[in-house]
């Protein structure tokens, strides 16, 4: 009874229950490369027989059961079986349709006698997959230990994963757990099999899951775990290679059910929901039918100017939005628009003259934050007839702050400025003494024009 309970718990933990077999079939071909350890230690006793004998029995039964899967091909690479005290590996059976009898024949004849060459086998594995571009490629390593293998298998595994050829590498460890001093997670997804029955169950479920798709429903929710109407892009990246695997849109409204997305149950994903700011999920795998709730409490931000106070055309300033105390630009939002942001605090810069900085603006769940940007006024500046160098400054916090430089070649200028107290300073370009500078104080009022004539000041 304890054995049956253990098997049930294991299968639930792996997400490999029989329900996985009900999923829709993958549209492309799946290719599984078996890399089998035939080093001398595989003669050690384990369960009912030597490790190699147990492995052969499991694989022979497995190949009998998967021979009818139409979209799956299996190949066999072996290491440690050719020469004593030698590191060697060969592709014994290549990928081809309906080759399970050939695989079984080869597996029956394997004799462990060499050393562990897992790194070499993994390094050569990329050349084993046909280059037709229409398959999910999986590597499955069966071994009784990787700690004493030649080469840096972690470095090799990273190269294999970065190549983009392989979707996932699995390591099934058999024998004693002490033989795995460090679980080889750097190589791929590691599973230790403490006994023969679990080994058999794991191999069958892995192969059947390889031929399926996971059906996943995502749901963005507010702080009360309720969905809300929104449409945002979602990008799925391969966790290891960072390559884009899927690009879709999340859509929810009250009139339509949430869509179901088909994902590879053997892939590991990093997921980005392009809310503002983005929500990122790392190292996710999916199996069977899953419903994933993603907390995304949001409020809205509206930026506007009071159009009732003027008949003039409103300025179209660029508005920069950042998360509070962050230098990373999150978004640009035009004046007069409303945009959703995740709950939090934000810094807002209106690129007017002079710029307006709004710090620590709160966005609350389900609430609208409205910010009224002052209407600008206009400076009509008349300069001396000679070419002049000049600048405009604004009085803020008891001091002058630079706003902009003047055009030295223009005798008159019209400059749109935010309301406030200003000072203009200029001097003829050919003048060399300090006393030649001219200054004027002026006030800019919202939606009004202020005239400053420095030609009169210079007379």
Image (tube, rainbow, N blue to C red):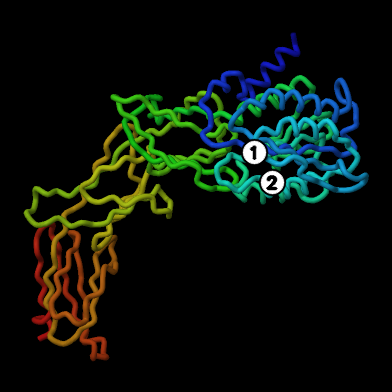
Q: Position of residue 181 (x, y in %)?
A: 81, 37
Quarter where residue 62 is shown:
top right
In-image side of 132 versus 96 (left or right): left
**Image: 39 above or below 325:** above
Label disc, if present, on residue 128 of the rendered structure = 2
In the rendered image, the quadrant that contains the C terminus is bottom left
**Image: 418 above or below 299:** below
Q: Position of residue 269 (x, y in %)?
A: 54, 39
Q: Residue at x 88, y 37 (%)?
A: 112
| Mark closer to the chain start, 2 or 1 | 2
**Quick one: label 2, few (<14), some, or many (20+) residues within 10 Å?**
some
**Quick one: label 1, few (<14), some, or many (20+) residues within 10 Å?**
many
In-image side of 344 versus 264 (left or right): left
Q: Residue at x 83, y 29 (%)?
A: 175
Closer to the camera in the image, 412 or 226: 226
In-image side of 270 versus 458 (left or right): right
Please, what secondary structure does the residue beneath circle 1 have? Answer: strand
Q: Residue furthest top?
A: 1
Please, what secondary structure does the residue beneath circle 2 have? Answer: helix
Closer to the camera in the image, 116 or 224: 116
Q: Position of residue 2 (x, y in %)?
A: 75, 11
**Image: 227 above or below 37:** above
Quarter where residue 20 is shown:
top right
Quarter where residue 267 is shown:
top right
Residue placed under numbered mark 1 in the picture: 138
Q: CA distance from mark 2 to mark 1?
A: 11 Å
Q: Residue at x 67, y 51 (%)?
A: 159
**Image: 205 above or below 280:** above
Q: Residue at x 57, y 43 (%)?
A: 239
In the rendered image, the quadrant that contains the N terminus is top right
- Eye-nearest disc, 2 or 1: 2
């Amino acid at each position: 009874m304890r054995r049956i309970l253990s098997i049930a718990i294991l299968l639930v933990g792996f997400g490999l229950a029989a329900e996985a077999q009900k999923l829709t079939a993958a549209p492309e071909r799946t290719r599984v490369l078996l890399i089998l350890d035939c080093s001398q230690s595989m003669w050690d006793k384990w369960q009912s027989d030597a490790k190699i004998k147990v492995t052969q029995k499991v694989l022979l039964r497995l190949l009998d059961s998967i021979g009818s899967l139409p979209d799956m091909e299996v190949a066999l690479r072996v290491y440690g079986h050719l020469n004593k005290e030698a590191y060697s590996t060969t592709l014994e059976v290549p990928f081809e349709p309906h080759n399970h009898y050939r695989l079984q024949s080869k597996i029956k004849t394997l004799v462990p006698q060499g050393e562990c060459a897992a790194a070499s086998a993994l390094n050569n594995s990329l050349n084993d997959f046909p280059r037709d571009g229409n398959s999910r490629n999986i590597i499955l390593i069966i071994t009784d230990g990787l700690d004493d293998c030649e080469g840096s298998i972690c470095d090799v595994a990273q190269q294999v994963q970065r190549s983009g050829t392989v979707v996932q590498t699995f390591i099934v460890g058999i024998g004693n757990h002490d033989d795995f001093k460090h679980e080889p997670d750097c190589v791929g997804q590691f599973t230790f099999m403490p006994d023969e029955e679990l080994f058999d169950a794991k191999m069958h479920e892995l192969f059947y899951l390889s031929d399926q798709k996971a059906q996943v429903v995502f749901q963005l929710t507010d702080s009360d775990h309720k969905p809300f109407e929104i449409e945002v892009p979602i990008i799925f990246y391969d966790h290891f290679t960072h390559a884009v695997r899927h690009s879709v849109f999340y859509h929810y409204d009250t009139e339509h059910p949430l869509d179901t997305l088909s994902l590879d149950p053997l892939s590991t994903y990093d997921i980005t929901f392009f809310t503002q700011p983005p929500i990122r999920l790392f190292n996710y795998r999916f199996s069977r039918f899953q419903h994933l709730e993603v907390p995304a409490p949001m409020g809205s931000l509206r930026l506007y100017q009071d159009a009732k106070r003027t008949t003039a055309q409103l300025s179209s300033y660029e508005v920069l939005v950042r998360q509070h105390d962050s230098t990373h630009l999150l978004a640009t939002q035009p004046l007069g628009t409303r945009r959703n942001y995740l709950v939090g605090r934000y810094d807002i810069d209106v690129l007017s003259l002079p710029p307006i900085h709004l710090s620590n603006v709160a966005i609350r769940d389900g609430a609208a934050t409205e910010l009224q940007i002052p209407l600008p006024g206009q400076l009509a500046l008349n300069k001396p007839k000679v070419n002049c160098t000049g600048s405009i400054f604004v009085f803020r916090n008891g001091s002058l702050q630079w706003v902009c430089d003047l055009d030295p070649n223009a005798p008159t200028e019209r400059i749109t400025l935010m309301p406030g107290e200003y000072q203009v300073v200029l001097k003829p370009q050919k003048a060399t003494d300090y006393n030649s500078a001219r200054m004027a104080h002026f006030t800019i009022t919202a939606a009004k024009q202020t005239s400053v004539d420095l030609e009169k000041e210079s007379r």
